[in-house]
Image (tube, rainbow, N blue to C red):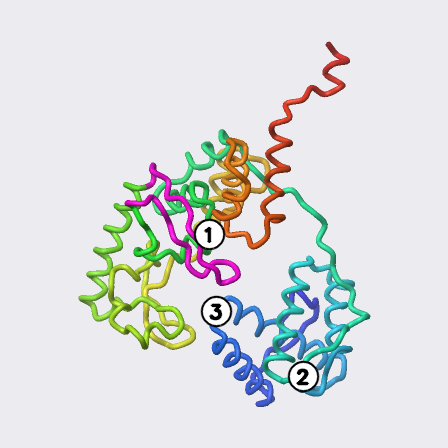
Amino acid sequence: MLDRFSGEHYTETRSPSAMSALLDDVRSALRRRHMSYATEKSYLGWIRRFVHFHARQQGAYVHPRHLGGPEVEAFLNHLANERDVAASTQTQALSALLFLFDAVLGQPLGTMAGLTRVRKPPRLPTVLSQAEVAAVLAHLDGTAGLIARLLYGSGLRVSGCLRLRVKDLDFDRAQITVRSGKGDRDRATVLPASLAEPLRAQVARVAALHRRDLAAGFGDAPLPHAFARKNPSAARALGWQFVFPASRISADPRTGAFHRFHLDPSVVQKAVRDAARRAGIARRVTCHTFRHSFATHLIETGTDVRTVQELLGHAKLATTQVYLHVARLNGLRMTSPLDRLAA
């Protein structure tokens, strides 16, 4: 198998047993801390790559307890120098290995003075004009179209949108509550008036689907953390069902219990890419582009930047201020010196 990050071929194996035991310990530590399943998969993947990297270097499997800062440096420098990974990729790998040595092995890593950190240069986000947003949305319908409109109308991340439960929609207050967002923080954002009726209809479809699941002996929604033990009956309540459910029931990879999870993000991502292509938008358009456009358009129409920060759930104002810069550039309407020369 070719690892796309390390660039090396390796044979995935369950042996030696120490490797399996190590990964089990990592899983247990992650679940005790209520880390998301996506984080669990990511961390386990990086720990496997780290172990395989040093197995190739030394010609034999070496348990991470016998490794340390220099070996972590060597692996991360390999990612930076040989594999030319993005800054976020190297940071993710570092986070996984810090967790391994600190939380699992009890051997905190010291200062790694020789670590080559990939620097993330400042980038301006891709922002569509309102006409371009309308053009893309015109090529989206059904569930994907409703989700895309919610991404733009409420500034949601696609992951946060798909994790919405029925109880998170407050039609009376025109408000959406985003639970356990980035940084495990809750926040509230606007529920667009134009989406109230489509969302009510979506909830009605979810209710009908939930009744069929209950009749078939299913209908338990996955509940967060220990809430299932505190209130086991909540799992069958309509309020805990996902607003955008998957088309089929599947097994929870952690518990083995059968649930109807939310729609897979790839369904929406592919639909948005196809819609942008059909709309003739030459720039790269993703689900997150709608969030960038939401923030920029609010600022352009006079919304205070701190209000936008709260709606987006940014921990730091500096993160939101990039949209001030984009909005200022969009609003300059200046005449180019070349145009004045031609005149």
Of circles 1 and 2, which is in front?
Answer: 2
Magenta segment: 172-195
Q: Which mark is residue 158?
A: 1
The location of residue 71, given as percent across then percent down, is 75, 78
> Does the CB distance between marks 1 and 2 fall below 8 Å?
no
Q: Neighbour class for label 1 at 10 Å: few (<14), some, many (≥20)?
A: many
Judging from the image, what secondary structure is the residue with disc 1 in?
helix
Work out which quarter of the rendered image holds the N terminus and state it.
Answer: bottom right
Work out which quarter of the rendered image holds the C terminus and state it.
Answer: top right
Q: Residue at x 32, y 71 (%)?
A: 258
Q: Neighbour class for label 2 at 10 Å: few (<14), some, many (≥20)?
A: some
Q: Neighbour class for label 3 at 10 Å: few (<14), some, many (≥20)?
A: some
Identity of the amino acid at label 3?
Tyr
The location of residue 81, given as percent across then percent down, is 78, 63
Q: Residue at x 48, y 68 (%)?
A: 36
The residue at which mark 3 appears reads as 37
Q: Which mark is residue 107?
A: 2
Give the Cα distance between marks 3 and 2.
24 Å
Work out whether residue 37 or residue 237 is closer to the camera in this orientation and state it: 237
> Does the CB distance between marks 3 and 1 fall below 8 Å?
no
Apparent side of residue 89 relative to residue 75 in the rendered image (left or right): left
Residue most extreme to the bottom: 17
Give the Cα distance between marks 1 and 2.
37 Å
Apparent side of residue 224 relative to residue 211 in the rendered image (left or right): right
Work out whether residue 83 or residue 329 is closer to the camera in this orientation and state it: 329
Q: Residue at x 65, y 59 (%)?
A: 88
- Does label 3 or label 2 sit earlier along the sequence? 3
Residue most extreme to the right: 114
| Residue 105 to residue 37: above or below | below
